[in-house]
Image (cartoon, coloured by chain):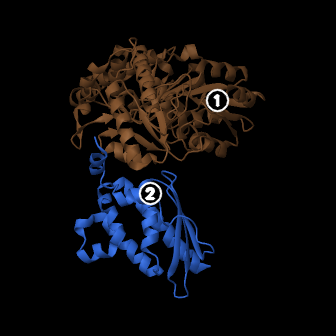
Amino acid sequence: MSEAALQADASIYQQLVVERARRPLHAGTVEPADGAADGTNPLCGDTVHVTLRRDPGGRAVAVRHRTRGCAICAAAADLMAETVQGATRNEAEAVFGRFQRLLQDGETALDAETRRQLGLLNAFGELHGYRSRRKCAILPWSALLAAFKSGEDA
Amino acid sequence: MNALSSTTPDLSHLRADFPILSETIRGKPFVFLDSAASAQKPAVVIDAMTHTMRHQYANVHRGLHWMSERTSDAYEGVRDKVAALLNAASREEIVFTGSSTGAINLVAYSYGALLRPDQAVLISEMEHHANIVPWQMLRDRRGIELRVAPVDERGELDLGAMEALLADGRVGLVSITHMSNVLGTVTPAARIAELAHAAGALLLLDGSQAAVHRPVDVKAIGADFYVFTGHKLYGPTGIGVLWARHALLEAMPPFMGGGDMIGSVSFERSTWAEVPHKFEAGTPPIVEVIGLGAAIDYVQAIGMGTIQAHEAGLTEHALARLGAVEGLRVIGEARTRGGVISFTVDGAHAHDIATLLDRNGIAVRAGTHCAEPLMRRFGITSTARASFGIYTTTQEIDVLADTLDRIRSFLV
C-alpha cells in the first residue's frame, strides 16, 4: 500500500490538513490579547487555547491558537485562525454555522455560494462521513467563540 | 516473518467458530484487535442463547412447571462452571451480577458497609475507573480513606510502597487489578494477598482482563473477592461474576432488595435468602448466564493454559514488530504481561492512528481506556491499544505493524 493509496483511503486527511497539523501557520499566543479561552474535549483530553485582539470596530486583527490534539483538531484550529482574521464575532459565528453544515451534511449538500464562502475550510468536507471525529474539528471553534465573548465581558 | 516459537499453540482453526470474523470492513478483511474492550462471540455462545429463548425458557427459581425447572437447572448449572473456572471452594460462592462494574459496586456497597470510617481502601494507579469510582463513592458515603499504590516506570506495581501504605493496619480492603487493561501488566496476586493479609486487610482482584487470558485459581492466590465479566470472555454482555469466600458473603448485608433475594417478606420485616441468592435480587440475566456457561465450556475445552501460551506468543511477536516501528513507544514494560499493548507514535495522535487503521479494516481502541489517572502517571493524554484474543493471528499483527509504518510516514 503506497502513501497515495493510504491517502485515498483516508480522505479526511487532505494534504492541507496534514500540512497544517505538521506545520501550523497561526500557532502561538497574541500578546497582549483582549480575548482568550480554552476548549477541552473530555473524551480524549485534547485542548485548544485561543487568544485574539480586536480593533475598535470589533474585528479580530490577530487570532492565534495553541493546540494539543489530533491532526484534525490541530488543522481545524489553524485554518480557523486564518479564516477569521478580520472578522467580527457575528461574522465568525456565521462562518462557524457554515462549517457545521459542511460537517453535518457534506459538501454535496451545500450550494456553490456557501462552498465558496467556506474557502480553505472545504478541506474538511469529508469529515461528515466520520461522525466520531466531527467534534475534533469543532473544538477550536468553541474556544474561539468563547474567546470573543471573554473579550466583550471584560 | 513468523516470530512464534515452537511452543506457541496454533489456534487459527478457532477463527471459523466466530461468525463475525468473516465480515469485511470497506472491502478489507476485518482485523479485530480490540478484544480487551469486548471479545467476539463463538457460534456456540450465540446458539446457546438463541436455543434457550427458542426452546427452553421461563423464569428461574419460581415456577413449579417443567419449563421453569429446566431453565433453573441450566442457570444454576453455570454456577458450577464458574466455580470450576476459578477453583472456588463451592458453587454458593458465585454471585451473578450485571458486569465487573456491578460486582465491584456490590462489594463497595455491601462489604463497604462493614468498614469503619477510620479504615481505608487501597487501590493502585493502574486501575480502571470501575475500580476507582465505587471506592470514591464509598469514601464520600462512609468517610473511609482512599489510598493509591504507585506504579513504577515499567508499569509494575510498587510493592514496597504498597507495603508502606498497609503498614499502619488501617486498610480494610485492597482492591487491585489482576491485569491492567492499559499496560497489560499482570500483578503478583498471591504476593499482594500475603501483604494484604499480613496487614489485616482483605483482597479484591479485578479479573476483567486476567480471567480471559490465563488460568485463575482463587484458592492458590489466596484472594477474598474476585470479579470478572462475561463479554470479555467470549460470552454475552450483561453478565458479570463476583466470587467471594463463603463466610464473607454470609457476613455481608444485601446490596439490592427485591424478589428472589428474600427468605420471607412482611410489611414489618423481611429475611434474606441464603447466599448467593441474597445478592441476586430480581429476575437475573437468565439468557446471559446460560451464554456465559457456553463460553466457559468453550474456553475450558481449549484450555486456559493453552490460551495463555498462545497469547504470550502473540504478545512477544507484537512487541518485536511494533518495537520496530519508528517513533512508536509501548506504554508499560512489565515482565509478566498479557496480550494488551498500548502505544503512542511520535507526532501522530492516537485518534488519527485509530481512524487511519480503521480505514484499513483494523479495529483498535484509542483514548484514555477508562484509566485517566494512569494516563497522567505516564505523562500522556491518550494511547492507541491493540489487544488480542484466541482468534488473533500473527498475520493480523503484521498487518497492524505494516500499516502503522505507512501511517507514520503519512502523518509525521
Chain B is shown in which shade? brown
Image quarter of residue A52: bottom right
Q: Which quadrant of the figure contains the N terminus of chain B?
A: top left
In the displayed structure, would residue B217 be above or below residue B43? above
Front-most of residues B215 and B412: B412
Q: Is residue B286 visible?
A: no
Q: Of all residues shown, which one is farthest toward the right?
A: B168
Above or below: residue A85 compared with residue B406: below
The amino acid pointed to by label 2 is Ala
Against A59, is A147 above or below?
above
Disc 2 with disc 1 on a shared chain = no
Q: Residues within 10 Å of mark 1 (few under 14, many from 20)?
A: many
Task: Name the mark on residue A21.
Answer: 2
Q: Residue at x 21, y 41 (%)?
A: B27
Q: Position of residue B241 (x, y in %)?
A: 46, 28
Q: Which picture quadrant has residue B293?
A: top left
Q: Which mark is residue B174?
A: 1
